[in-house]
Image: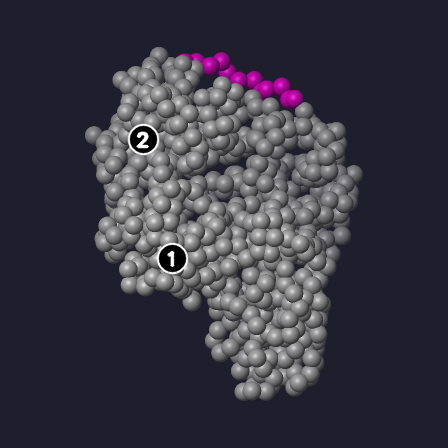
Amino acid sequence: MRRLGGRCAAILLGTCLTLPASAWSQGTCPGHEATVAAGWASYRAGAIMQADSLFRAALRACPTSDPARVGIGYVALREGWLDSASTYLEGVVARHPGDIDALIGLGLIAARRGDSAAAVRRFEAVRAIEPDNSTARDYLHRLVVVPPPPRPPLQLPDTVIMPARAHGDRFEILVDGAWRPFYINGINLGAALPGKFPSEFPDTAVYTKWIAQITEMGANTIRLYTINPPGLYDAIYSYNVAHPARPLWILHGVWAELPPEGDYLDSVWEGEFFAEMRRVVDLLHGRADLAPRPGHASGHYVADVSPWVLAYLIGREWEPYSVADFNTLRASDTTWSGRFVRVSGGTPMDAWLGRALDTLVAYETATYRAQRPVGYTNWPTLDPMRHPTESTAGEEVAIREAQGERLPRRVRELDNDSVGLDATRLHPTLAFPAGVFASFHAYPYYPDFMVLDPGYGRAASSEGPSNYFGYLKDLKAHHPGMPLIIAEYGVPASRGIAHLQPQGWHHGGHSEADMAAIDARLTREIAEAGLAGGILFAWMDEWFKKNWLVIDFELPAERNRLWLNRMDPEQMYGVYAMEPEPAVAGETAGDRARAWRDVQPLRVDAHGTLRAAADAAALWLRYEPVGPPPDELQIGFDMVDSTAGAFALAGDAAPHTSAGLEAVVVVRGDTARVVLDPAFQPFKVFRFRRQFTEEHLQRPTFLAPPPDTFVGRWALEYNRPVHPVPRAKGVYEPALVVTNRVRWGRDGTEYAGAGYDRGVLLPGEPPDGDWQRLPDGSVELRIPWLLLNVTDPSSRHVLFDPAGATESSDLSATQVQSIGIAVTFRYGERWSAGGSIVPVSRFTWPTWDAPRWRARRRPVFDSLQATWRDLERHLTREPH
């Protein structure tokens, strides 16, 4: 008996079939099995093109190798090349009708093509061979109504079962009849792979692999925001049964959209939310059969993981306006008196949340005679404290108008500190000993009161100054006698920054090494502040995420999941980087130098050679000059209209070009930056209140600012319309952005704004660096797409407002067939063009609907593994 080609851990597979070796003897060639196994190892690691090369090498060595054909078929399926995948897999099934891997692949192909009948036929063939195959089961449930599997009769215990409880300031779990302290070292799990919407869930084997990696990292808790497919709970069950001394606990959420008209007591909306709570409880007890619903997981849930469900965490980061509207709408409903949870002295929203939690506890108690702690999601925007540095929108308008201030249009922002939610208003009754807890999503850089509050600025943990630690201590002081957890925290490794923070723990702009160190320190400070645990955000990068600073510039919006926007911090929090297959292969510049030779030159002349390539994150360029490195190199870009933009490169003496340019990269000495035509700028950054001196400004100090930070009275607006016009001179502006806007405290104190030049390219190798100057004088650049106003590289869309657009028009993008690239350099005052017009060469790249990507473990894996190990050693005590 043997596994077929070692394929059972492949990302798109659910299981493998075990057959006698004779069934495959005709495809066996000495030594080729090792190449096939290496192909699957590369596939599992996300190195898809390397896997493809290995599978094809195996097929060349053994032309009768069906295991190699299956591998090639799965690579094609992963890349979205359905016809090619079908050809390879159909051939395998024709020779071996019982090959489960090939049958599953063909089922997936049919499902993606919308051919439900063919998909059902393939998956039914799988179940005829292997009745318990979870992938076939899951897909059949999505495609047809499959009878639920038999379950043993529900046997209720004599007393209420309570595997965990909230006890004082911490959680406790029941181990061998004794209560033991439990500190949460957790990870948030999102499930949207690159190119996928969040409702497109991975296959079962992916979950099995993730659970093994998450536990290897040292997490003791996994936080799930919503209902996932049965395969995830199967994977957790299998792991926990195999590791009873160190199981993975579950903190499970119940997701909700906002109610219509802001009324959380709307009977239809509330009824559906409460039904979702019941579904979550049932599936965790292995007794849910969920019919397919658009945007939701479905299937037969048979794994009873309830013994390891630590707590329920309902809801979402509620928007302040929604809470304020409900409090006004239901102003008299400020209490709730349930059998298990009571609320007194709160707001209508506090009371409704108590009602929801009471309903959840009542259902699980009555149906399964089980209880566990309950809480709801909150965030600093809705914390129960009052922050003097954070005026509400109405207060700010009044202050500024009284000072004769011009009020610029606001970029997207919520009204922080205008209303709050207070978990201390929740009181468990004697019938609910499992208790309640408080939970916050809290990051170190936002809201601004965390950056500006003088008390937080003076705070320090045992490791040094920390505004974040000051906020955590303040938050904990407001929640005495109950567990308080930080259910989301961390910093992203994005190229772009959306907010600056005094200790340098910005919302983006971190190297991966810095990200690892910061996340580890935040983890330790959560524990030092006396909290009950922290849950890092997040397990992996998710490309569909959006951030306020870039959301309007990802067009078409529905395609943002198809490319990695390195300027968007929300997309790059992952312990695992989900990154595109690089345009040019090679881990170092030396390796890539050889690979660049296979890239067709875009331009070759007496001065040098220019090459260009593209992937789902960046435009790659390499310029190889003839002779010594120049004093200055400029590469210009004609992005949207050859007849518009500047017909010259940057600077008064810079040469003219054969087409209009909207952007230029200037490489000078050890610096490189992108500058933009003023009419191609997405933002307008300006100073205001010039009639006032700046001596009265409160100026935050950023200990680790990114390049070209500016602090003062700066404001940000959209630069509308984005529509370059022809210009003879090469006048370009830096790509400035205001990340922290000017604010007014409730006492009228003015706090300076801050921003930075996001066009400054960072030196070094990927993933942290944007460019390198090599020993031979060559320059390699990797320019994030959005720095060139490419709003969707997968369909070649570029930011561009049509003629007639106004400041109030919606932002627009136009599809281009190619972009123009010009290159020139100078020695001293002499430009390489020598008075000639610099030609603009055309570059295009293939579009895609299924991105090529790979998964890569970031250094934060190791830093959190060590930190969690130390915390567990220090925070675990003997049972009472």
- Image location of residue 307, percent across then percent down: 40, 26
Could you say which disc has been placed on residue 423 in the image?
2
Residue for point 56% across, 87% down = 829
- What secondary structure is the stretch in magenta mostly built from? loop
- Image location of residue 165, percent across then percent down: 31, 27
Callout 2, which amino acid?
Ala
Q: Is residue 166 above or below residue 84?
A: above
Q: Which residues are magenta?
A: 145-156
721 horizontally vs 746: left or right: right
Residue for point 37% across, 24% down = 331
| Crowd around label 1: few <14 · some 14–19 · many ≥20 (10 Å) | many
Viewer-nearest residue: 777 or 319: 319
764 horizontally vs 176: left or right: right
Residue for point 26% across, 29% down = 167
On-image quarter of the N terminus: top right
Does the segment drawn in magenta span residue 155?
Answer: yes
Viewer-nearest residue: 606 or 804: 804
Count all numbered tags in the image, as a single digit: 2
- Model colouring: one colour
- Image location of residue 221, percent across then percent down: 39, 37
Callout 1, which amino acid?
Gly
User: Element type at marker 1?
Assistant: strand
Going from N to C along the chain, the mark reached first, 1 or 2, is: 2
User: Element type at marker 2?
Assistant: helix
On-image quarter of the C terminus: top left
Could you say which disc has been placed on residue 753 in the image?
1
